[in-house]
Amino acid sequence: MGWSFRWVSSFGTPFNYDFGVSFTPAQAASGKVNYNYAMRDFVSEELQGGSVFYRNGEGEIFHTYSSYARGLEGALGTYAVLDVTPKGRNETGATHSLADWVRHHDRYGHTAADACAAHPEHQAATCHHDAAPARK
């Protein structure tokens, strides 16, 4: 199709605060933040959000699309894979999101027992220490 576009990050700019996906300590202390066009309980210093902009030939920039929270799932291929597994996303923890149990690849325990010990609320249903050999 011949399309090309640049990905641009908001890192190091105040855009995330303007966009309402990053919150100051004062906002966090209040217990409520304006996120996704509504006042909500504060749960994190940063939440999900994505924007699309277009620059025309005259250099004018237009904000053409924004999405928050679950509206960004299409960009996460992992969700499509998890959605066809028996337990799906298994979003049963405190925040009802993958953040309740998914960690960076190097932040899991070294054995199945270590991983289960990190989340005792799931031990009865999901932890079978003899099912997987210990990693070294």
Image (spheres, rainbow, N blue to C red):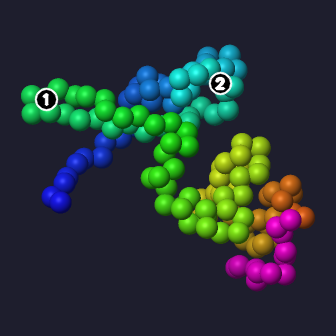
Q: Is residue 135 above or below residue 17?
A: below
Residue situated in front as seen by the camera: 37 or 41 = 37
Answer with mark 1 or mark 2, whichever residue precedes in sequence: 2
Q: Is residue 83 left or right of residue 65?
A: right
Q: Main secondary structure of the magenta part?
A: loop
**Looking at the image, is 92 positioned above or below residue 106?**
above
Identity, as a three-letter code, of the amino acid under mark 2: Arg
Residue behind mark 1: 59
Q: What is the C-alpha distance between the residues marked 1 and 2?
A: 36 Å
Q: Quick one: SS at disc 1?
A: loop
Q: Quadrant of residue 80?
A: bottom right
Magenta span of residues: 125-136
Amino acid marked by disc 1? Gly
How far across and how far down the image is residue 12, in percent?
Answer: 39, 33
Apparent side of residue 30 relative to residue 36 in the rendered image (left or right):
right
Give the number of callouts.
2
Residue 86 seen in render: yes
Residue 25 at what x, y percent from top left? 61, 22
Q: Based on the picture, tell me whether residue 119 belongs to the magenta stretch.
A: no
* Residue 117 in view, yes or no: no
Q: Quadrant of residue 32?
A: top right
Residue shown at the point (77%, 43%) measured from the top left: 94
* Horizontal arrangement in the rendering, residue 111 relative to residue 82 (left or right): right
Tell me the crowding category of disc 2: few under 14, some 14 to 19, or many 20 or more residues within 10 angstroms, Cα based: few
Residue 29, compared with residue 112, is above or below; it is above
As drawn, the residue found furthest toward the right would be 124
Quarter containing the C terminus: bottom right
Mark 2 secondary-structure assignment: strand
Mark 1 residue crowding within 10 angstroms, few (<14) / some (14–19) / many (20+): few
> Where is the N terminus found, in terms of image quarters?
bottom left
- For residue 40, which numbered disc appears in the image? 2
Mark 1 and mark 2 in contact? Answer it, CB < 8 Å. no
